[in-house]
Image: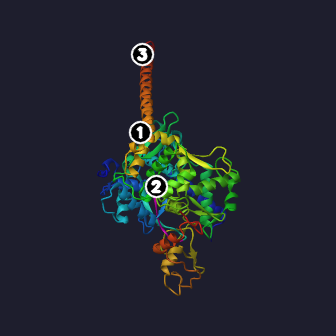
Amino acid sequence: MTSNHTSVPSYMQGSTRRVGIMTDVHRRFLQLLMTHGVLEEWDVKRLQKHCYKVHDCNATVEKLEDFINNINSVLESLYIEIKKGVTEDDGRPIYALVNLATTSVSKMASDFAENELDLFRKALELIIDSETGFASSTNILNLVDQLKGKKMRKKEAEQVLQKFVQHKWLVEKEGEFTLHCRAILEMEQYIRETYPDAVKVCNICHSLLIQGQSCETCGIKMHLPCVAKYFQSNSEPRCPHCNDYWPHEIPEVFDPEKEREAGISKSNKKPLRSRQH
Amino acid sequence: MPRGQKSKLRAREKRRQALEESQDLGLQRTTSTTTNAATVSYTRSNDGASNEEGPRSSQDPTATEPLHRSPLDEKVFILVYYLLYKYQMKEPITKADMLRNVIQNYRNHFHEILKRASDHLELIFGLDTRELDPYKHIYVLINKLEPNCDGRVSDGSSLPKSGLLMLVLGVIFMKDNCATEEQMWEVLNMMGIFAGRRHYIYGEPRKLLTQDLVKENYLEYRQVPNSNPPRYEFLWGPRAHAETSKMRVLEFVAKIHNTVPSAFPTWYEEALQDEEERARARAAARARTAAMASARSRAMAGVRSRATASSSSHP
């Protein structure tokens, strides 16, 4: 049996660029990626192989980057794309299906009420303004009186925050909240446009920065994985901007091979710290 | 001189409002490369958009490509993403939710918008939009892709997600339509699927079976009556009954064992009976629909003739 090849009809094409061919391999891939919300690169590669195995077992597995670009050329007409990013805390490459339309937070495909969205905005603002990229549960809940829409009690607000965690907008760590890596991928543009003064940007990759290290002299900031790469095997790390000694601990560059070996040996144990996916 | 906290917050609030208002219907699209954050934003020009909302989209001097999209097109895109999001959250989609959160002022175009969104989902994602409940207008997205490789399964990891569900339904069926948790894990362990061990397709199998598939109405997971300490059992959920049948599940199980359904005589009998009942139910439903349709058309004809009669008597 051959797999179902369909080229996207012209009325669905958004640009004059050549649009790729969608087969069941790509469709199943999209479904599974959508189901997980966000996936690490290693899982994405296994997912891709699985989709080939199930839907077109005789074809050669296309290189992941080309595979994804092919899909994105079709998704373009829907203002959606598979976006690649890196987790801020430990540098894992991740992929998520995101909505490219930079509409307001309320349009982020949600069933949230006005006061719930406002709670998210308040939490977001606290996170962006904070030094660490985390906002404490207490500080967020203290703002419930200022919310638009129906009055919300603190107890309710706690539940709503948990809903945000479920929807992968926020991550909770020891009573503090920060943005989920999925939310950063999806909302970066919106955040940069809405908070241009407060938003922090990494000195190395120039992307939005929520968590990172900062130079104590000149104030520039860098993502932890960017620090790791920039100062890799540098015994005397210095600030790229003011050349002052970089005072923080330099993290390790993320190595997928090492991760896999470690993962196999402790497959049944719970992870030591919660990860952003 | 740094601005005071209050004026900073006020400016921020004003800016956010202005941005949201201008984006009420005007989708601003950004394209970004994956390696760096260089973004180019295209602003939609308001070409011939005869819509009541009148989006006040800002004219971006750096825009190089005016994108010709009608407001209806935009609703379609928003709906596509909304449906995908619900699919991801494994929540059913109601017509009311769609109208309130997406369609809004375009209620009259609901079916057109939904149809176009469904077409995109089918073509690009291989997902079927099906009305699960025509009275309460609840929709679900169903994977319509059939695995077309040779159905032989060598180990548990090559089962697609729906395959795992078929297996689970098979276990339940063959344990007299009700399998205890112990019986379930005994079988799954033989296929290399273990509780607590994360699988790259299914995630954690225990959560999948006892929460996710229950939430999606494929399985029922309940306490064995009068069990102390509490033990649990699995049954088919209403959605499993709706979307598949005992015969299909038996066929699946037979394939795994490289045999045919009739090799399991008792279960085959039960599956055959189930098929007959379903055929009868389908025939009855068709008869009902036909009766309702003709009653409706008779009523409509009556209304029309009364309307023409009354309008002809008015000046």
Q: Residue A102: x percent and y percent? A: 48, 56
**Subunit bearing disc 1:** B
Chain letter for mark 3: B
The one nearer the camera, A23 or A202, is A23
- In the image, residue B261 sits, relative to residue B189, either above or below, namely above
Q: Residue B27: x, y in percent?
A: 45, 52
> Who comes first in sequence, dot 1 or dot 3?
1
| Callout 3 amino acid | Ser
Badge 3 crowding class, 10 Å Cα cut-off, few under 14, some 14 to 19, many 20 or more, is: few
Side of A236 where B147 appears, left or right = left
Relative vertical location of residue B273 with respect to residue B252 in this rendering, above or below:
above
Return the residue at label 2.
A34
Residue beneath the point at 34% across and 64% down: A66
Q: Is residue B65 visible?
A: no
Highlighted magenta segment, given as a residue range: A90-98
CA–CA distance in space, label 1 to label 3: 30 Å
- The chain letter under disc 2 is A
